Image (tube, rainbow, N blue to C red):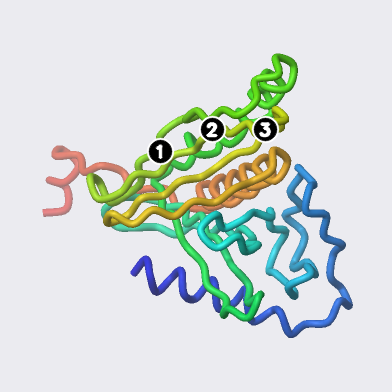
Amino acid sequence: MKQGLLAGLIGLALALGSLTSAGADTFDPDRASFDPESKFVITPFGAIIGDPAQLTDLASGRTGFTHCSAFPDKNRGLLLMASIVIPAQDGAEGGGHGMMMQVDQARAFIAYLRKGPEWATVARENKVGLFSKPIGDVIGTEGEAEHLSVRFVSDEQSNGSVRIEHVLGGVTKAFGFGINPALKYAAQAEFVLEKALAEMPDSAPAEDADKSKLFE
């Protein structure tokens, strides 16, 4: 199910590349705020659905963008799919990646992304230089086969960034974000998660043994 959902989301986002700029919002790759009303933006790689944050696929060096969706699972409750869309570029076809989280994991993921600015300030004010430290572990929905974490990185000039590392089935994917795009990804994920939670139907009341006798 996960791969099917991810393929569908990536296909939709990449299909938007054929749209014109009419009606599209101006895209600022360093903006920290998320606009839930934005339908799509025009980037140097074509149109991308919604108001994504920009990132770098650290394995290939290619530019990517974020997308989030949420859906219910009968065994695990509401799940957040935090997706990465990599448009076609540099002669390579487009692709993407997905990170699935339960509600508590998603909220931890959001909180960790939001630690980036504070840590970047510490690195800059103290001229920390080259440095890397895990902000926090999310783990993910696949148990021992999965490990999702958020890491803070400072370069030699003490400029901070955020790195997401996702290990699934022994394969590691890593994505780099500027501090502001990391904040935008957090806002995007939070909006989708909380909207989905608010729209979920209330659960049915528990069975009451005395009341049940009335219906025998």
Which residue shows up at 73% across the image and 72% down it?
45
> What residue is pinned by disc 1?
138
Q: Nearer the viewer, mark 1 or mark 3?
A: 3
Picture quarter with the N terminus: bottom left
Disc 2 to disc 1, C-alpha distance: 9 Å
> What residue is pinned by disc 3?
160
Task: Report whether 186 appears left or right of 27.
Answer: left
The image shows residue 99 at horizontal and vertical percentages of 44, 54
Query: Helix or strand or loop: what does disc 2 sit on?
Result: helix
Disc 1 to disc 3, C-alpha distance: 21 Å
Picture quarter with the C terminus: bottom left
Disc 3 to disc 2, C-alpha distance: 14 Å
Question: What amino acid is at disc 1?
Answer: Val
Viewer-closest of 33 and 121 = 121
Question: What amino acid is at disc 3?
Answer: Gly
> What residue is pinned by disc 2?
112
Contact, CB < 8 Å: mark 2 with mark 1? Answer: yes
Question: What amino acid is at disc 2?
Answer: Tyr
Which residue shows up at 46% across the image and 60% down it?
98
* Of the image marks 2 and 1, the number of the one nearer the N terminus: 2
The image shows residue 162 at horizontal and vertical percentages of 60, 39
